[in-house]
Every structure is written in structure tokens, then in C-alpha cells.
Amino acid sequence: MSEASPRPTIGFFGIGLMGKPMAINLLKAGFPVIAWNRTSAKAAALEAHGARVAETPEAAAKADVLITMLAAGPEVRQILESVIEVVAPGALVIDMSSTRQSEAEAISALLEAHGVHFIDAPVSGGVVGAEAATLAIMAGGDPAQFERAKPVLSAMGRATLVGPAGCGQLSKLCNQLIVGATLNIVAEALLLAEAGGADPAAVRQAIRGGFAESRILEVHGQRMLDRNFLPGGQIKTQLKDMENILDAAAKAGIRLGITEMVTQHYGSIVGTVPHADQSAILLAVEQDNPRHRVGKGPDRLPA
């Protein structure tokens, strides 16, 4: 597909925190979008932006390109299995959800058996990146199909082909390993500053621009100082990603000891604040240190 050719119709499955702005950016780029969501009101919100709303998954599956942005691998497979008979041979499925590498490989095999092409293309950048169309998109699949998908993916962010099917998910897991561990380290650093008698906000400002600088320190460090744990991403999603990282490590025959500890830390609070932003890992650090707390304000948590 070249830029000069007609825009393919996109069937978009999953109009959530991330899916909605991603679909809107596709519409802004001139792609016809047929939106489906299990809660139909979320899909209906895209009508004002020019989308058609599908009453059933099958109606959205009769598109040139199908994009899934769902909660996890089992949901992706369930939807695709339910619509596979109406997907046109030669169509392209792009799964932008965060799943296990093994799940992406199994979905690829399922679709290829029906003459349907597949790319796994998970994203990083959060809701802010989705809204700004600046997502980092990590794609796994056939190079020819990636070239076909590039104009679609470019409407949502910057796409990089990292290997065959399943490697997009592996790359996302590498990203989430770094994000998940760094969130813990930033939380511990801020608590150490507070407990040791320094102003944690001033410490954060002092170390910015040095080797400790990162988007996590910039964005989530400020969230921790503000105790603003409204999502954004969610603790339960980060925990799912950490568990998927350990699954990929086991498949590769390696052990990731630090990742094991970080996974346990997210698991320690998922039962109480599952929908809080990932920066709420600060609560787990404070839970380990019950006499210490960063900042004076109240916690802002989802209802």
C-alpha cells in the first residue's frame, strides 16, 4: 500500500483509554474507521469524529485492516476466532494490545491458516502519546506486511520492525521491564530523600539532567510528589506485563532476578489499588516503610 493509494478501511476493536485517541488519530489522517467495543457507548463516542459504529464484531471485521487494542491475549484471540470466517483473505490484522509473545505467535499461526496476515504491534507512550500520535510502536511480522501497515501505524506514532511475529510483544516486554523497574527505583529515591530530611521535590529537580534523568523521573516522579495516582496506565496492567516478561524469560531459558522482585512488589498492592496509575507503586514502597511518606497531600486515586 502506498501513500497515493486509497486509504484502507480500518476495523478498530477496543475503544478504551488508549484505543479511543488512537482511533481518532486514524480518522484525522483520513482513514475510514469502523469501531467496535464490548461497551457500545464507548464506540458511539467516535461517531462525532466520523467513525462508523459496528453493532457486532463481525461488522467491524469486514475491513481491509483490523486493529485490536484489547485488555490481554485471551481477549484478542477470542475476538479473532469469533470473526475469522468473515475476514477477507489477504486482510491484515494488527494487534496493538500488550500480550505474551507466545500468544502473538499462536494468533499469527491461526490467521495465516485462513490466509490472513498478522503483525503484532504493541505500543509505549501512554494516553499522552496516544493523544499526540507519538506512540513508540514495536512491530513483529513479515517485512512486506510491515511496509503495508506503515501508513496506518504512522498515523498513531513511530513504528519500528523488530523481528518476526511475536517480536513486537517481546520488544514491548523489554520496554515494560525497564519502565516497571524504574518506577520502583524512582519511588524508593523519593522516599529516601524524604526520610533522610531533604526536600524530595528539590532532590528530583537537582538530579534531572544528569545520568538519572528519564521520562519516568520527569512524569511519574512528579505524579508521586503530587500523589496523583489517577490513570494513565494501571497497576493491574503493569503487573500483567511483568508476569508476561517472566513468561518470556522462562521461554528463553533465562532468569531475571530483579524483575521477579519488581513483579512481587506490584502484586503486593494490586488487590487494593488495581486501577491506580503505575506511579502508585510508591504506595508499595511506603507500605514497606510504614512510618514514612512522600509529601503531605492526600492520595488521588480512582473511584
Image (tube, helix red, strand yellow):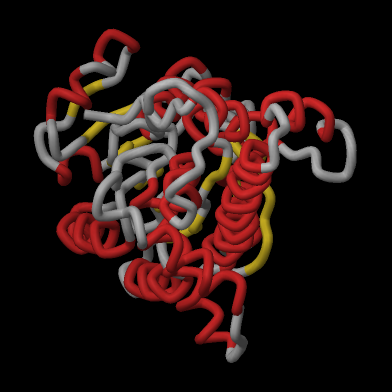
Judge left or right: residue 199 versus residue 272: right
Judge left or right: residue 225 versus residue 202: left
Q: Of 299 and 271, which appears nearest the observer?
A: 299
Q: Quadrant of the N terminus?
A: top right
Query: Horizontal and vertical percent for residue 226?
Result: 51, 23
Residue occupying image coordinates x 63% and y 26% = 4
Judge left or right: residue 115 versus residue 295: left
Instruction: Answer with the quarter of the image where residue 203 lies.
Output: top right
Query: Horizontal and vertical percent for residue 190?
Result: 64, 40
Number of numbered discs visible in the structure rendering: 0
Q: Quadrant of the C terminus?
A: top left
Is any part of residue 12 visible from this angle? yes
Q: Of 69 and 92, which appears nearest the observer?
A: 69
Residue occupying image coordinates x 29% and y 47% = 274
Query: Horizontal and vertical percent for residue 143?
Result: 65, 60
Judge left or right: residue 288 versus residue 129: left
Q: Residue furthest right?
A: 210
Q: Of 137 and 207, which appears nearest the observer?
A: 207
Residue occupying image coordinates x 61% and y 87% = 254
Q: Residue furthest bottom?
A: 253
Query: Horizontal and vertical percent for residue 187?
Result: 59, 45
Answer above or below: position of 182 versus 109. Answer: above
Residue occupying image coordinates x 24% and y 57% = 75
Is any part of residue 145 visible from this angle? no
Answer above or below: position of 205 versus 142. Answer: above
Answer above or below: position of 271 versus 58. Answer: below
Instruction: Answer with the quarter of the image where residue 213 lies.
Output: top right
